[in-house]
């Protein structure tokens, strides 16, 4: 006797078929997606098709397509073709759309044509979180991560890459010409058919050299002397790991330290983070709706004007200073061994001498004061201080801002650990969701839309974990 659970007979008719509502449990996260989108004023957010006049074949409502995309990114389904298939077979998506199944082109065009509106939806969800009072601690961690674009390294060119490639081609040409010279002297030195093959290779190399000449002219006209052929906005970026450079985009995120929600994000094609601190911190403060805020960042964000901009905006930045001087490593005193006296505007050196203000200059847009002591040439400790005749100290006109920040960092040694635990986990999660493949879209505006959908899905999943499905539905309806 068999003891297995029996399924339903496929040929059996049903007198009372199941309702769509029966397919989705009341605690299913898809109900949050439905409630959130239904509560939005899509016209005010910029979805133009929401007010499309009647005429011709009816279009899909933006709410339907937005629900499909949010569901897709919640479940790691970013491809429009995969979303088309899921809309036809996935019971949750069938419930969410009311059995509507747009084709992949309609789905892809929606993301392409509504980038600004989708970004506004992401901001609206953060506003909902703020209304729910989940941002009780005005502390955020800021970091950036590189994501690979739809552009291989071979189709990205810089001045250095062109020079290296030209050198390789010239070496190949010289090698093939040398073989042809040997064949001219004695035809038996090369196998039959080798000479036509070499001539064909030389012809192809000449074509490649011509392409390099064209690319080199384009590089001279490019603002940053870099071009990408597949995705024109993608840029070559390096990271701290050796040989880990990629062609892609720099994704910036400001993450709430309490609940690890991404309160602000942006996408740039700058290969470094030095100019991103104040912009991201101000966006995060606006999202939190607070006057004072603390921003944690790593050494890559240390930039004096950016730190000053944060201070002037009422934001407390905590960014460790990178130690770029070789003095300490070579056994000499560095700037930290000199004590500044604001009353006399002078430094006291380790030997007890006073380094007085000598002159003021401007470098890279910064006003700098120069100090040194007249006792340096005859000082017994000079070899431990400098290799020159005197030790010169440079002080920025707003150096007190950096000194105050360093004092706060010394008082909060756990800040670096808190930053890592807050923001790096978020990037790890996002990269896991997006997968190992490159981004699906090209050009900076479209990539921003793609990242906004990923951020919205991440924040929604976090809030569902914190509040529960029914709690979120009630909060949205309130």
Image: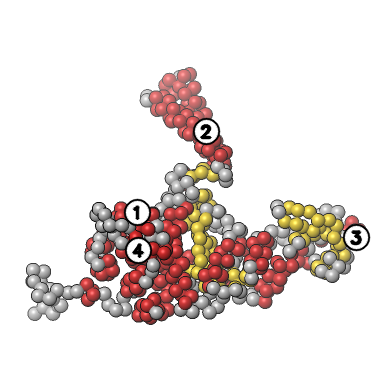
Asked if one can make out residue 468 in the rendered structure from this viewpoint, the answer is no
Q: CA separation, marks 4 and 2? A: 46 Å
Query: In the structure shown, which secondary structural element does the residue marked by tag 1 occupy?
Result: helix
Q: Which mark is residue 109?
A: 1
Which circle's residue, 4 or 1, is located before the other in the chain? 4
User: Of discs 1 and 2, which sits in the foreground?
Assistant: 1
85 left or right of 135 in image: left
| Residue drawn at (35%, 63%) of the image | 66
Q: Which mark is residue 375?
A: 3
| Residue drawn at (58%, 66%) of the image | 282
Which circle's residue, 1 or 2, is located before the other in the chain? 1
Q: CA separation, marks 3 and 4? A: 72 Å
Q: Which residue is mark 2?
A: 213
User: Of discs 2 and 3, which sits in the foreground?
Assistant: 2
Which circle's residue, 2 or 3, is located before the other in the chain? 2
| Residue drawn at (68%, 70%) of the image | 405
Query: In the structure shown, which secondary structural element does the residue marked by tag 4 occupy?
Result: helix
């Amino acid at each position: 006797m068999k003891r297995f659970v029996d399924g339903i007979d496929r040929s059996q008719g049903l007198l009372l078929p199941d309702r769509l509502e029966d397919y989705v449990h009341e605690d299913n996260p898809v109900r949050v997606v439905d409630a959130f989108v239904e509560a939005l004023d899509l016209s005010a957010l910029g979805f133009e098709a929401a007010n499309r006049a009647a005429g011709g074949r009816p279009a899909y409502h933006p709410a339907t397509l937005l629900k499909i995309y949010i569901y897709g990114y919640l479940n790691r389904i970013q491809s429009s073709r995969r979303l088309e298939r899921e809309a036809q077979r996935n019971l949750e998506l069938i419930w969410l759309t009311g059995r509507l199944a747009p084709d992949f082109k309609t789905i892809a065009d929606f993301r392409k044509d509504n980038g600004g509106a989708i970004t506004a939806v992401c901001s609206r969800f953060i506003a909902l979180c703020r209304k729910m009072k989940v941002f009780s601690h005005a502390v955020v961690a800021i970091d950036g991560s590189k994501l690979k674009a739809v552009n291989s390294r071979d189709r990205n060119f810089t001045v250095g890459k062109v020079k290296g490639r030209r050198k390789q081609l010239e070496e190949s040409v010289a090698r093939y010409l040398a073989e042809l010279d040997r064949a001219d002297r004695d035809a038996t030195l090369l196998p039959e058919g080798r000479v036509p093959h070499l001539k064909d290779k030389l012809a192809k190399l000449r074509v490649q050299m011509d392409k390099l000449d064209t690319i080199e002219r384009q590089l001279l006209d490019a603002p940053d002397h870099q071009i990408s052929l597949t995705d024109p906005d993608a840029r070559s970026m390096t990271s701290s790991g050796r040989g880990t450079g990629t062609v892609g985009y720099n994704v910036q995120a400001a993450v709430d330290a309490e609940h690890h929600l991404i309160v602000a994000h942006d996408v740039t094609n700058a290969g470094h983070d030095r100019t991103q601190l104040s912009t991201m911190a101000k966006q995060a403060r606006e999202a939190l709706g607070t006057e004072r805020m603390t921003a944690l960042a790593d050494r890559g964000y240390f930039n004096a004007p950016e730190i000053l901009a944060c201070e002037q905006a009422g934001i407390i930045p905590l960014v460790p200073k990178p130690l770029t001087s070789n003095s300490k490593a070579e056994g000499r005193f560095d700037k930290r061994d000199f004590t500044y006296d604001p009353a006399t505007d002078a430094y006291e050196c380790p030997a007890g001498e006073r380094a007085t203000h000598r002159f003021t200059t401007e470098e890279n847009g910064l006003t700098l004061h120069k100090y040194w002591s007249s006792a340096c040439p005859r000082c017994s400790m000079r070899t431990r201080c400098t290799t020159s005749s005197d030790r010169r100290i440079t002080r920025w006109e707003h150096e007190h801002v950096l000194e105050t920040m360093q004092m706060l960092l010394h008082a909060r040694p756990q800040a670096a650990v808190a930053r890592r635990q807050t923001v790096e986990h978020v990037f790890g999660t996002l990269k896991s969701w997006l997968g190992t493949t490159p981004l699906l879209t090209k050009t900076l505006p479209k990539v921003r839309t793609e990242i906004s959908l990923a951020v919205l899905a991440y924040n929604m999943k976090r809030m569902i974990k914190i509040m529960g499905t029914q709690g979120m539905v009630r909060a949205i309806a309130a």
